Structures are given as structure tokens and as C-alpha cells.
Image: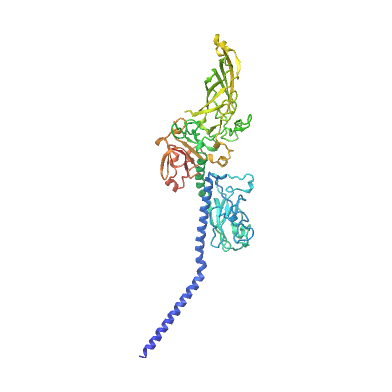
Amino acid sequence: MKARPQRRGRQRGLAIIALVALLVLGMSWMVISAVSAPANRTAPDRDHNARVLQQAKTALIGHVGLRAGDATTPEDNPGRLPCPEAPGSANNFGGGVYTESDDGVAAGNCTLPAVGRLPWRTLGLDKLTDSAGEPLWYVVSPAWALSNATLPPLTTFINSDTAGQLTLDAAGDVVALIIAPGPALNVQAVGGCTARNQTRLRQPNVDWDLRDFLECANADANAAFATNGAAGSFNDQVVSVTSGEVLPVIEASVASRFVKQFGTSMRYCGAPWPPCSGAGAAVIFPFAANFNDPAGSNFQGNNNVLQGLPPLSFGGTGPCLANTPVAPFCAPPPACAAGSDNRCRPGFVTYRNNPAIARTGGATLVASNCAVAGTPNTLTCTLTTYSSIFVPNSWMTFTMDVDTRNIGMSFRQINAAVQMTGVDTTIAGVNLPFGYSVTSAAMNNNGDATVRISSRVPQGSGGPLADAVCGLGGLLGFFNDCFQHVITLPFMWVDAPLVQPTDPTAAWFYRNGWHQLMYYAISSANAPDGGGACAGATCLTINGPTVTNTHRALLTVTGRVVPGQNRPSNNETNWLEGENVDLDSVFATRDPVLMINRTFNDHVVAIDSN
């Protein structure tokens, strides 16, 4: 019986020893954990930074693409990157005259290369911060943002051939950088770093000094940046955006925007042409220009060419000049000067001098003779008529079918507000006060166009002629008088807005050189000699996630040079890839095999479809 208390004592002793051991193990674990915590936090911190940097990068690329393709509130410089946050607008801590809506808003223009806070509000983001609680920083390459050195005007030149001018770890073609700055450091003058004890002021409306946030190569405010620096003096975490990452988005957006802004105006249909849909519809697109090096092309369409460069030549005859010769008349301005632009071809679209003139009422038409002169053309016609002496110098109504060369090889519009002379400008129902009406327009198989106008020579006009001129003799000559009327029709074809380099809507397209990176194709049925209605196999086909074969015309943004291509070039194989290079009626938006090797970057969009 005496042994039992001793056994219980031993058990209690063992329990105490176990408890002490457990406490020692627990304390040891806590000590070890505390010691190892900084090392363990490094990976989570970097993971956090990587996530927010990627989120910011995705938002930046999306913002640029969205702005580039917006045809409703169009960006004058599609593809440009926003500047960093405006200096002094950043605020972490409140107070002062700071307005919350200023925080995270991009500056309108900046000194390039620009370094500053990420404009998170402009990008549609929440205010992203790194693992140290610091807002992200952002760098923009020269040529990719609006520079205040170009005031005025604020413009960029960005297309598929525009490279980034920044480098990251000596690798080039970087258009932007996003940086997680990390906690403040006492930077030492070692390994290319400039000594600085970083100080981050806690006050509103601060024009932050980048050297208090970025270190070593990243604090030099030049175009060379790095992901690494001297130990203990560098903690920036950097993600880059290259031209190869952002340009595909810009190219797709530009192609879509071009079609939205100009697609319908590329067609020849709608009054006075046949309707665009319904009974009698005939949708015509002009022939393409022969494909050659776009940098030196004149972009003149050619008969029977269905694919090539878009026919973007222009003559300089834009919107009519007001108050010429007197209000409210107007006439086309002088043609552009040849040599000012490869596309400037004032003599490409011209009147033919043989309009068909037919009397429709009044005096008898004996003869007509017409001639064309000037650039832009003026058509001058001499009409010989006779009428009874009992209705002296009678009026005569007539139609005139005016033929114009190369309308079907270009984008032109009819300006029915040019002033015709020698005709009655008071007759009711005939386009007062211009003296004529355009009643119809038709495209001919050879790319010429015929416009019919209706007008009349007024009563009491014309110079008297001998009856013999009219072939009048005997009683016929005795009872009739012969007259001569001279009428003129200024050039009534003007450049469509989409080919005018100074048109406010089209200016972005030419200033950035996108016309030199586009391929144009039309269906044979919708060409000037095709009848105007494609169906099935006669339409163009686009292969993509789905196959569609209802397209009358399409456009391809050819994108950057891919491996195996060389430019400048007159050969389509150096511009197009895969299915798009065989010059048939089938095009593709993707090629999985070529895309794996990054040798496909065409962006195909339909201009018009059934």
C-alpha cells in the first residue's frame, strides 16, 4: 500500500517534465519563427507586388486599346500612353487644398521619358499599393506619350513600326515600366548607385522626388532601367510593357475604328446612286491600287484589281469654298500641289469632254459641243437651239450625262453646290439657286462614273445666230430663230473625307502612317464591274472562331514585321501571313500554328457585309 503514493509522485513528476518540455518546444518554435519571419515574408511580398504590377499592366494595355478604338469620343493620338500622375496631385494623407478626384489622374502632357506615380484613376483601377503600402510608379517611353516639348500641337506618331525607347536590364523596345518602389532605404554610393537617405514627406500636394522612391539606375531619370541593384541599396520590383505586347491591341483597335468612322463612306450606294439595300440595291467599292511599297505608292486604284493597297489618292478638292462667287454659292478649292504627298494626284479624277446632252422640253436642240479644261476641271458646253419667232428666244430643258474618269478607283463624293453658269438659276425644283439637279449616278464597268444632271437654258438667253447655222431655210428659217448658249459646270467631284489628310476626323490616320500598313480587298461582285451584289462564294470569307462568307469588302492591318519578313517591300509576303498571303477570297483572323512561333499578326476586319 505504501508503494502507490510513490508511483503517483513519479507520474506527477513525469507530467511536469512533459509540460516543461512542451513549453520549451513552444518557446523554441516562437523564437525560431520570429528569427525566420523576415526571410519568410520576402516571397509573399514579392508575390503581392507581382500581382498588383500585373494588374496595373493589364489595365494600362486595355486602356490604350480602348482609347485607340473609340470612334465615339475619338483619341487624336491613338496608341499613346497616358502620362504619369500630374505633379502635385498625389496625396496619401489628406489635408491642404487637395481634391480627392485629383489623385491618380494622368497629366495631360509630360516631359519624356516621364517618371511619376501610376495614374490609377485614369486607368480605371483602385489605388494599388505594393507590400510596403507605397503607390506604384510608372515610366513612359519617348514617342509614346504627349510631350510638353511639342506644344503646340500635342501629337504623336505611333503605328506598328514604332518601337519603345526604354531599356530594362539592357533589353530594348520597352514602351512603359511599372514599379513597386518598396520601403524607403538609405542608399549607399556603391555599384552604380547614388547615395541618398530616402525621405518620403507625409503631406498633401507633393511633387514627389523620384530619388526618394526609386534607386540606382532607376533614379537617374534617363531611358535605362534595371530590375537589380546593389544589395541593401535597391528594392524596386519592375514589370515592363513592350511594343510587342501593346501593339496587337492597338492594331486591332485601329482597324475597328477605321471601319466605324469610314466604312459606310467607302461605298458607292445611296442617292443619287442605287440604294444600299432592298430593291435595286448595288453596293460598289472602288478597285484597289496595285500593291507595292506603301511608302512610295500613289495609292491610285487600277481597273480590275480586287486586292492591294486601298485607293487613297486625293486631288485636294475638299469641302467647297463658301461665298464663291457670291453667297450662298460655293466651288471646290484648288487642287493639291503634286509632290506635297505621294497620294496627291490632282489629274487622276477628271471629266470626259463628251457628255450626252438631250433636250427634254422647250426649244429644239440642234447641236452641242463640249470641252474640258483646268485642274480641277471645268466642263464648258456650247448649245445651239432654235425656237419659233412667236416664242422668241425660248427656254429649253435638258439632261446632261457627265462622265468622269477613275471614280471607281478612288473615294470621291458629289458636290452639288458648285455653281453652274449660263443656265436658269430661278427655275422651281432644280436645286435653287445652282440651276441644276443631280438626278442619278451610275458606276461603269471600267471604273468611270456617269452623273445625270437636269437643267434649262433660260428664256431670253443666248446669242443670235444666222439661220443657216441651224440648217433652217425657206419658211422654216423665216418663222424660227437660231441661238447659241454657253454653259459651264465646275468640277463637282470632291475628295471623300477619309482621303483628306487635313480632315479633322481622318487626320490621325495619315499623321500616324496607318495607311501604309493596310491591305484592302473587295469581292468581285461588289467591284465597279461586278453588279453590286455578292452571295456565297462570290463574297469574301473570314475564317476565325467562326467562318463567315458574307463580306463585300475587308481591311487588314498588316502589323509589325515578323521573322522571315523584310521591309520595305513590293511583295505581299513581307506584309501578310498564313491564309492571307495567297491572294484568294479567303482571309483569316488567326493561325494557331504560326501564332505559336509569333509569325502571324494580321488583323482582319470586315468593312461591309450582306
Return the x and y of residue 22 as percentages of the image width and height.
44, 77
Quadrant of residue 588 in the image? top left
Question: In the figure, is residue 28 to the left or right of 318?
Answer: left
Please say if 97 is above or below 499.
below
Q: Residue furthest front?
A: 390
Q: Residue at x 51, y 60 (%)?
A: 48
Q: Residue at x 51, y 53 (%)?
A: 58
Return the x and y of residue 338 as percentages of the image width and height.
59, 32
> Can residue 378 be seen by looking at this rendering?
no
Q: Residue furthest bottom?
A: 2
Nearer the observer, 369 or 466? 466
Scheme by which the image is coloured: rainbow
Return the x and y of residue 397 as percentages of the image width and height.
54, 22
Quadrant of residue 427 in the image? top right
Please say if 388 is above or below 46.
above
Nearer the observer, 261 or 40? 261
Q: Residue furthest top?
A: 474
Tally of numbered discs: 0
Nearer the observer, 355 or 344? 355
> Can residue 591 be seen by looking at this rendering?
yes
Quadrant location, the C terminus: top left
